[in-house]
Structure formats: structure tokens, C-alpha cells
Amino acid sequence: MTADAFSDLVLFAVCAGLAWHCLPTERGRAGIGVACVLIGTAAFLGVFRFSSWAGASEAVKGAHQFMALVAAVGAFPIWAMSLAQPDSAVARRLAGAWWVAFVLAGVGVALVVMGVKLWQQAVPLLCGSWIAYTMGVQRSGWSRWCGLAGVLCLMGTFAVALLVQTPDALLLGQLSKTQALHYLLAAALLGTCWPPRSPTHR
Amino acid sequence: MNPILYAIPVFLLTIAIECAWACKLRGNQTPQAGGGTRRLYDFADTIGSIQIGVLSRIAVAFPRLLTVGIFFLVHQQFAVATWDLQSPLHWLAALLIYDFFYYWKHRANHEVRLMWAGHITHHNSEYFNLSTALRQSSTTFIFDWMFYLPMAVMGVPVQMFVVVALIDLLYQFWVHTELIPKMGWFDRIFASPSNHRVHHGQDEYCVDKNYGGILILWDRVFGTFQEERDQPIAYGVRTPLQSFNPLWGNFHYYALIWQDFRAARGWSAKIEALFAPPSGWLGEKLGSFDAANFKRHEVLVSPGIRRYVLVQHALNVAGVCVFLLFFKQWAPWQGGLAAAWMVCGLVATTALMEARRWGLWLEVGRWLTAPLLAVALWGLGAAWF
């Protein structure tokens, strides 16, 4: 297994853990769960894409890129919405979260394949700003600090994605761009989603 | 050439055969929910259903390239495998996969308000016969294509996708009938008339069941299968349309969603107005069904109007064939003009059946402008503008 594949495995593990924790109905955090399932699926495919297994890399390349696009335009908005309004149907109900993510992903994929490439960057960036605002305004105590640390990691993800142009560049002398993206995103998910918050039951 | 053009005469012929069969075998009568009998075929309902089908053919002619185009672009950029157009096994696999995604598309069409707004058009008829099959929505194309994008990623070629989609669609025509009884083992594997009667029912046990297109196995796997019971089913929806107007039939639920969307306070409530199930998250909006007091939307059409409507209806069907035949040769403005003229015809015909006075004026106006349309389409051509 390559270092890039391992970083995707770490992201997958974080997503799987969060999804496992959030998806059960009684937890009322289905939105986070759906976002993690989408990002986790992309990460799972990434493990194969970046692995050194013969044939696997090429076979899943398209599927990984597609799911990464779906995660960017479908999962990020659900993630942000679920944190901003944890009592909303999108945050609490599996069907609500799933169908909103589905339609947003469909529209996003259509726009990107038709040439509006900016959409793939703009949506996560806007959602990231929304998550940052939510963490700053809605949370308190250690949960707030945890969230802000997650936001910092998320901003780091965007910085790496936008500023590092060469895939071979090493960050901090150790990490490739791919690895940095995956580790930072995993940390961002943990920081913003992990403190288990019980939504008010309606 | 558009394959639907070939299918239209077959559809109309089979509807005529079913209608004749219904009249000969049962005197056009069948037991109805709550006691008594009702007609199998109703003149206004049949005309209304076919007119809605004609409207859908006109409407989907415009964005077809866009939706198939998105599939093509996704295939081009993300396809993971190459499928063999010569292999029967690949075709079978593509049909199976399409049917799987069709199940989920159909289920979403019933469980998400924004999608139900389009699909409700197909369910508004309170009768269940082959003409109901043609009662297709003009707006479901807005979301339908999204469900099949994974097929593009899997590498299914566009040609294969278009053909299996057509096979799946055409298969579902024959399941819209009350004349074919239960079919034993076939009902347990495939979508059949018995299974689909349940799907169109508004009785308590029928709601949101049997979504399968060709295979009913998907419903068994995902827990939405329901076997038909030995009691008459009341067809239609809980909030009846009470109109034969094809435009209102297509857009009335969007109007309701728009009202709810405007009334909702805050973005999360607005999202709920769009994405909640039509019956509410907990089924609270479904309401109860009272079979004994169920009354169909029926209008008395005088023999004279009936004859006129029948002639106009035949012209509308012929018109849509001409439209589909020439559509690609026309400039967009010509296509739009022809579509608008035909939609006026569909609306006017159904308005005449409902004895609405404005229908008469619309019909007169339409025929007065017919020569202008003919000149615009064939006389002057695009250079005129």
C-alpha cells in the first residue's frame, strides 16, 4: 500500500466511524452520516486508486473522480446544513439528507461536466465558510475549540487544494498534496462533527 | 427517427382493443370500491389521459438532448469500463441495472415532494386502463436523468442506455389494465397488471407500493412489495385533481409546493417544503381514505361536443406525430411556435369537454391562427426572421 492510499484509508476510517455513529435514527444526525457516507465512498475508491495493486488503479480512477466530485458538490452542503441547523429535517432525517444531497450532487455533476468547473471548488469553499461561522457562533466551551480546530483543518484543505499546483510537491517535507488533503479533511470532519451533540427532539 | 412515432399507432390500437374487449366482456362495467359498479373506460378520462401523453411528447422533445447529453459527458469523463454493444449478456446486464435504478427513481418520485409534483400527473386518473399508461408527465425529466448517472460511470454506452430505457418504458405499457387477472408465478417476479393495480390504488394498503418497472423483485428486496387483495381498488390520489386540463394536471402540485415554499419561514423549512415526502415525514398529511364516499371526477359531455372532441383529439395525435417528425428540421422558434399552438389545442379540447366557455374562444383563436403557423413552419422558413 502506498502512502497516498494509506491517507485515503485513514479518511475512509474516519468517515466510516462517524457514519456508524451518526446514521442510526435515534441519534438524529443522519445529515452528518450521509455526508460521511459520500466522502467515505470516495475515500474507499481512492484506496484502490492510489494503491500499487496492478490494474486496480486504472479500473477505479473514473469512479473515484466521480465520487470525489459528488462529495464536493453534494456532501459538503449537507455537512454544513446539518451543523448549522441540527434540528432541521436535513440534519435529522435520513431521507431528507439523502435526497437533498442527491439533487445537489446531480445538479453539481451536470454543471461541472458541462464546463462550469468552478462549481466543484466554489461549493466546498462556501460550505467551509458556513461551517466556520457555525462553529464560531453556535458552539461554546471545548466543543467550540474542537470545532474551530476542525475549521482550521478544513481551511488548510482548501489552501492545499488551491495553492499547491504540483502533485509531487512535498508539504512539511513529508506529505504529498494528496496525503495532506486527505489527512486535513479527516481532521476537519472529526473536529467539526465528533463532539456528539444531541439535537432537541421535536 | 424517434421510435415513439412507431409506438403511437400500436398504443392507440391496443387501447381501442382493450376498450372493445371491456365493452364486450363486461359491458364496460367493473365492481367498484365501496359497492356498486363503475365504468372501465370513461370518455373524458381517456381523452384527458392521451392528451396529457401528447403534451409530454411535445415537452420532452426540447430537453432530450440535454439530459442524454449529460449522460454522454459523464460517460466520456468518468467511465470505468468498456461495454460491448455486440454482447447479449452486456445488454441484459444493462437492462437489469437500468431497472434497478428505475426502481429508485420511481420510489423517489413518490417519496420526495419535488419529484412527486411531476409524477402525480400519471397517478391523477381515477380509472386504470391502457390509456393511463400514456398519461406521462411533462416535467419528470427535470430529475430523472440524475438516477442513471452511475450507469454512465459504469461505462454503459449512450446507445445501450437509450435502448434499454425505451425497453423498460415500453414494457410498462401493458401492466396498466384491469382486464388481465393475477398471473401466478409471473406476479412474484415481474411487474404485472396485478402488481401495478396496487401501485395505482389509493386504498390504505396500496399507497407507496410496487415501484418495479420490469422486475418486481426490487420491491421484495427493499420492502415495498404488496400483493393485490381480492377487493376492488379505488384508483387515483387522495387529493383529486378534478380537472382534465393537461397543463393544470402537470403543474397543480408545483403550485401547491410554491405556496408552501413561500409560507415556510427559514431555509430549513423551505427545504422541507421541497423535499419532504408528500404524505409528510410521519404520514400525517396522507389523510384517511373513505371508499364508501369516494366519487370520481366525471363530466357529462354532449354527443355533439363528444364528436368534435374526438376529431380534434385525432388531429392532436396526428399533430404530435408531425411535430416529432419535423422537430429536428425546424429552427428553435419554429419548434416553440408549433409546440405552443398544439398545447393550445390540447387545453381547448379538454376545456370543451368540461363545458368551459373560454375553451370555445381558445379553439376559435387557434384555428384562425392555423394558416399563419403553416406559413411560419413550411412557407417562409427561418430566413423570415
Image: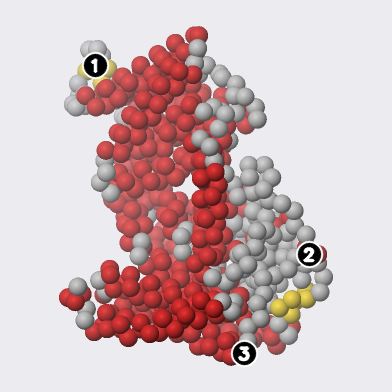
According to the image, label 2 marks what residue? B293
> What is the chain identity of the residue bearing mark 3?
B
The reply to whether callout 2 and callout 3 are in contact (CB within 8 Å) is: no
Left or right, residue B26 beside residue B35: left
Real-space Cα distance between discs 1 and 2? 73 Å
In this figure, which residue is indicated by the disc labeled 3?
A: B303
Q: Quadrant of residue B156?
A: bottom left
The answer to which quarter of the image holds residue B63 is: bottom left
Q: Position of residue B33 (x, y in %)?
A: 77, 67
As measured in the structure, the alpha-carbon distance from the residue carrying label 2 to the one carrying label 3 is: 29 Å
At 56% from the left and 18% from the top, the residue drawn is A196
The quarter of the rendered structure image containing the N terminus of chain B is: bottom left
Q: Does B314 appear above or below B148?
A: below
Residue type, numbered disc 1: Leu
Judge from the rendering whether residue A194 lies leftward or rightward of residue B149; answer left or right.
right
Please state which of residues A156 and B117 is positioned toward the viewer in this rendering. B117
Task: Look at 61% across and 64% down and name the residue there.
Answer: B241
Q: Position of residue A66 (x, y in %)?
A: 35, 41
Name the kind of residue labelled 3 in the image. Answer: Pro
Q: Quadrant of residue B174?
A: bottom right
